[in-house]
Image: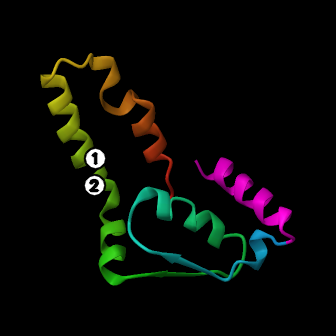
Amino acid sequence: MGDYFIKTLEKGLNAVGSSLAEIRRIIITHPHIDHFGSARDISEKGEVEIWIHEAAAQALEEYEEDFLDTNRFFESLLGKSGIPEELLGTNHPIFRLAQRVRL
């Protein structure tokens, strides 16, 4: 996940005469994967502060287990609804994508 998004961000920043090295602060507004997924990768490019509300930080600390719990719930629900087994669980692309997120 990280490489594609980092390269896309770098390209956009370069287009406006900036770079990842100029980022000094990341503000995570809430703990949704599309709002924090590359924060660590970006922060490793320079001296970057990551700001996040205490409650959101706790949610991120528990993200992996919460994700697994949610996945198990939906896997059970979808399985009971007749979705083929090969579309469920850890082999599904969405699950693999989420597992690559670096917290």
The picture places residue 63, in percent across and down from the top left corner, at 33, 60
x 27%, y 16%: residue? 84
The picture places residue 78, in percent across and down from the top left corner, at 20, 28
**The residue under label 1 is which amino acid type?**
Leu
Residue 66 colored magenta?
no
Find residue 13 and report its image quarter: bottom right
Residue 3 colored magenta?
yes
Find residue 89 and report its image quarter: top left
Q: How many C-alpha atoms fall within 10 Å of the one at disc 1: few (<14), some, or many (≥20)?
A: some
The picture places residue 68, in percent across and down from the top left corner, at 28, 47
Q: In the figure, 90 relative to 50: above or below?
A: above
Whether residue 23 sits left or right of residue 36 in the image: it is: right
x 27%, y 18%: residue? 85
Spatial CA distance of label 2 from label 1 is: 5 Å
Where disc 1 sits, the SS reads: helix
Whether residue 25 sits left or right of residue 88 in the image: it is: right
Magenta stretch in the rendered image: 1-17
Q: In the figure, 73 relative to 89: above or below?
A: below
Whether residue 98 sits left or right of residue 75 in the image: it is: right
Numbered badge on residue 65: 2
Where disc 2 sits, the SS reads: helix
**Does residue 103 appear in the picture of this structure?**
no
The picture places residue 38, in percent across and down from the top left corner, at 57, 61
Which of these two is toward me, 59 or 14? 14
Q: How many C-alpha atoms fall within 10 Å of the one at disc 2: few (<14), some, or many (≥20)?
A: few
